[in-house]
Image: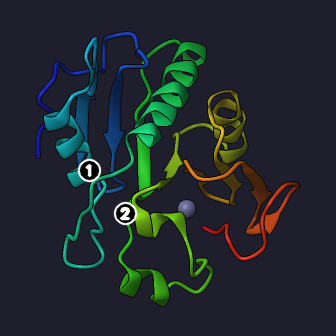
Amino acid sequence: MAGASEPLRDAPAGRDRLWLMRPDGTEVSSRFRTAEGYDRPQMLLLSWFMRDIHDDDRAVWMEPRLFDILAGVQASMSAVHGSALPLVVTSGYRTPRHNAALENAARTSMHLYGYAADVQVRGYPPRAVALAASFFSEGGIGLYDTFTHLDVWQRRRWSSGRPDFVREPGTAGQ
Ligand SMILES: [Zn+2]
């Protein structure tokens, strides 16, 4: 599915827009916020992009605040980098069936509710993405070897699947 907005490649990243990519190179550009608030067709575009590609392309409406965090991360990392960087989404929405099949995923993973995304920024370690996110996120930030988990639930911070500091038992996960 192609993005409906202008390409972001050569444009400075702003917090009202996102350039997302999947590991296979599929990408979407979206200006999802206007002066009136979230743009519903763009929310549809982005939510579809975050569908579970490992379970029948099932999709849910993603929580819009998640996109605000992602846009903040993208804007700040692109500013540091000097040009726009896509966020590579390795996991967005996850069906219960898919989540149950993952060895290290929490049973109550925020991915089940459309509240979470696992992202990478090529050329930067997950710790750098987590650091950028900590400026914007009042939700969960999980640091893993190859990606950073971001969600819009309660404030939690952990690394490599273990709680780093604040985490409610049995609630956080990949
Ligand atoms: Zn995750």
Q: Is mark 2 within 8 Å of ligand 1?
A: no
Give the numbered dot on residue 17. none
In the image shown, does 172 or 122 lie closer to the viewer?
172
| Image point (57%, 20%), residue name | 76
Q: Is mark 1 within 8 Å of ligand 1?
A: no
Above or below for 84 versus 114? above
Instruction: Give the mark nearest the N terminus, 2 or 1.
Output: 1
User: For ligand 1, which image quadrant applies?
Assistant: bottom right
Q: Quadrant of the C terminus?
A: bottom right
Residue 37 point in image, percent of width and height: 29, 22
Q: Judge the density around disc 2: few (<14), some (14-19), many (≥20) Cα neighbours within 10 Å.
A: many
| Image point (39%, 47%), residue name | 63
Is 83 displayed left or right of 154 in the figure?
A: left
Residue 171 point in image, percent of width and height: 67, 70
Residue placed under numbered mark 1 in the picture: 47
- Please state which amino acid type lies under the numbered disc 1: Ser
Residue 51 point in image, percent of width and height: 27, 61
Instruction: Tell whether label 1 touches label 2 (CB within 8 Å).
Output: yes
Q: Secondary structure at mark 2?
A: loop
Above or below for 30 versus 140? above
Q: Residue furthest front?
A: 36
Is 2 displayed left or right of 31 in the figure?
A: left
In the image shown, does 87 or 123 lie closer to the viewer?
87
**CA separation in Å, label 2 and label 1:** 8 Å
Residue placed under numbered mark 2 in the picture: 93
Above or below for 11 versus 73? above
In the image shown, does 37 or 94 lie closer to the viewer?
37
| Image point (69%, 36%), residue name | 128
Q: Secondary structure at mark 1?
A: helix
- Please state which amino acid type lies under the numbered disc 2: Tyr
| Image point (63%, 38%), residue name | 129
Q: Judge the density around disc 1: few (<14), some (14-19), many (≥20) Cα neighbours within 10 Å.
A: many
